[in-house]
Amino acid sequence: MNTATNRASHWLFPGRRAGQPFHPDHLSALLNEIGVPAAAARGAAIRQQLLELPAPVVADALGYHDKTTTRLRNETGGTWSRYAPGDHARSPAGWVSLGTGAGARPGSAE
């Protein structure tokens, strides 16, 4: 498919206007012409992600509402039902590490 008018474009799918990408509808139509159902492929891709990742993570990454990804996860048969969304980088208030050195475990002899 050779449609780029600007070969130095930084777009993966450059459009007809220099510096502009393909319009998603145009790309979808081209894919449908060669037998690739774009909508079905997109649905299959998100369902695969929901089998591998928690629904809130997929929702945040792809811009979906978490209720939508939870519903899709339930339809797909995913098992991430006990994932707690939120900031897991912080420690809970009052939490103190029991380790004394890098990699040390409480009660272990070094």
Image: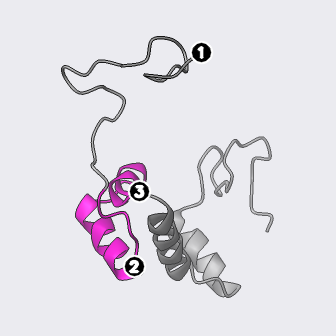
Asked if residue 46 lies left or right of residue 22, the reply is: left
Q: Identify which residue is drawn at 45% across, 22% down.
A: 107
Q: Using the numbered discs, state the Cα–Cα distance from disc 2 to disc 1 in whole angstroms.
A: 45 Å
- Tag 3's secondary structure? helix
Q: Which badge, 2 or 1, comes first in the chain's sequence?
A: 2
Q: Identify which residue is drawn at 23% across, 27% down.
A: 92
Q: Position of residue 22 (x, y in %)?
A: 59, 59
Main secondary structure type of the part rendered in magenta: helix
Q: Which residue is mark 1?
A: 110
* Callout 3 touching callout 2 (CB < 8 Å): no
Q: Position of residue 58 (x, y in %)?
A: 41, 56
Q: Quadrant of residue 83?
A: bottom left
Q: Using the numbered discs, state the Cα–Cα distance from disc 3 to disc 2 in whole angstroms.
A: 15 Å
Which labelled disc corresponds to residue 58? 3
Q: Using the numbered discs, state the Cα–Cα distance from disc 1 to disc 3 in whole angstroms.
A: 41 Å
Q: Which dot, 3 or 2, sits closer to the camera?
A: 2
Q: Which residue is mark 2?
A: 77
